[in-house]
Image (tube, rainbow, N blue to C red):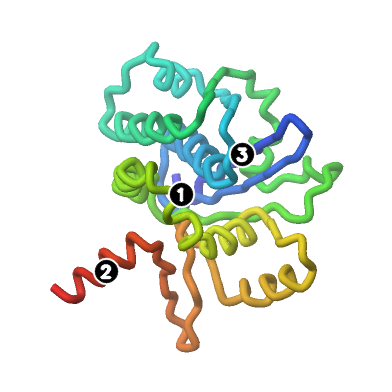
């Protein structure tokens, strides 16, 4: 159906919470929507440098796919599973288990932008719009990340500014320094995130995608050719 709503909650052992409400602006089956939520959760966990993760999911099909108990047959499911497995390789410890739907009420409520988080100390719950399924927007990026994962320490500083803006816009993470936080808050007004990509709003209203170093190098090579 159109406008599929997804929700995910990341909880640290210390009780810190990252809540995310996601709106899929494309048609997705229930199984595809479950995969979208799982993949988005793994991407966010990777971006915030989580190394060990336990996933609670109420979809028995996806759990059996990931664990290898069931074989994915549908082409879309095969691609979703491939992306998921490649993302799990970035974690030192990964575990996934099923929980009853009634025990997953926070994520289910986030999918409908409910009010269950009123009692929690959350300043905001960002809504992310993804325009294309993960099997279209991430399949090539996953391959590139796999090729470059050993070079992360080299490009970390170069691309750090992109991560700073994305973490602020998606998660509300600000610098500890009050002046730096104020400057970031003002500058971030000119940026937006679409399909997990950072864009800058130009003076003409056009959106300009912010490129990482390896992407900029590829573009420059293409232009010169």
Q: Earlier in the sequence, mark 3 or mark 2?
A: 3
All told, the count of numbered labels is: 3
* Camera-side mark, 1 or 3: 1
Asked if residue 47 is positioned above or below residue 195 in the image, the reply reads above
Instruction: Determine the secondary structure under disc 2.
Output: helix
Q: Earlier in the sequence, mark 1 or mark 3?
A: 3
Please state which of residues 157 and 197 is positioned toward the viewer in this rendering: 157
Tell me, yes or no, whether the two marked residues, 3 and 2, touch with CB atoms within 8 Å: no
Asked if residue 44 is positioned above or below residue 209 in the image, the reply reads above
Q: CA distance from mark 1 to mark 2?
A: 22 Å
Marking on residue 153: 1
At which x and y percent is residue 112? 64, 45
Asked if residue 55 is positioned above or below residue 209 in the image, the reply reads above
Q: Is residue 224 left or right of residue 197?
A: left
Q: CA distance from mark 3 to mark 2?
A: 34 Å
Marking on residue 219: 2
* Camera-side mark, 1 or 2: 1
* Camera-side mark, 3 or 2: 2
- Which quadrant is the N terminus positioned in? top left
At which x and y percent is residue 59? 52, 23
Marking on residue 8: 3
Please state which of residues 34 and 163 is positioned toward the viewer in this rendering: 163
Q: Is residue 163 left or right of residue 123?
A: left
Residue drawn at point x = 55 percent, y = 44 percent: 44
Instruction: Determine the secondary structure under disc 1.
Output: helix
Marking on residue 61: none
Q: Earlier in the sequence, mark 1 or mark 2?
A: 1
The residue furthest front is 154
Q: CA distance from mark 1 to mark 3?
A: 29 Å
């Amino acid at each position: 159906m159109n406008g599929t709503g997804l929700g995910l909650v990341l909880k640290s052992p210390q009780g810190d919470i990252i809540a995310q409400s996601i709106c899929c602006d494309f048609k997705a089956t229930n199984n595809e929507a479950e995969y979208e939520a799982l993949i988005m959760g793994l991407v966010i966990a990777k971006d915030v440098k989580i190394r060990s993760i336990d996933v609670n999911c109420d979809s028995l099909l996806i759990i059996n796919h990931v664990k290898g108990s069931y074989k994915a047959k549908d082409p879309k499911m095969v691609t979703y599973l491939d992306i998921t497995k490649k993302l799990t390789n970035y974690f030192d410890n990964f575990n996934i288990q099923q929980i009853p739907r009634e025990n997953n009420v926070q994520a289910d409520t986030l999918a409908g932008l409910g009010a269950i988080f009123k009692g929690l100390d959350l300043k905001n719950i960002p809504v992310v719009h993804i325009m294309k399924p993960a099997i279209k927007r991430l399949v090539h990026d996953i391959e590139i990340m796999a090729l470059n994962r050993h070079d992360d320490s080299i490009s970390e500083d170069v691309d750090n500014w992109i991560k700073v803006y994305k973490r602020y816009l998606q998660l509300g993470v600000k610098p500890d320094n009050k002046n730096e936080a104020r400057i970031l808050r003002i500058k971030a007004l000119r940026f937006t995130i679409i399909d997990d990509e950072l864009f800058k709003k130009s003076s003409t209203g056009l959106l300009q995608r912010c490129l990482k170093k390896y992407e900029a190098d590829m573009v420059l090579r293409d232009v010169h050719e």
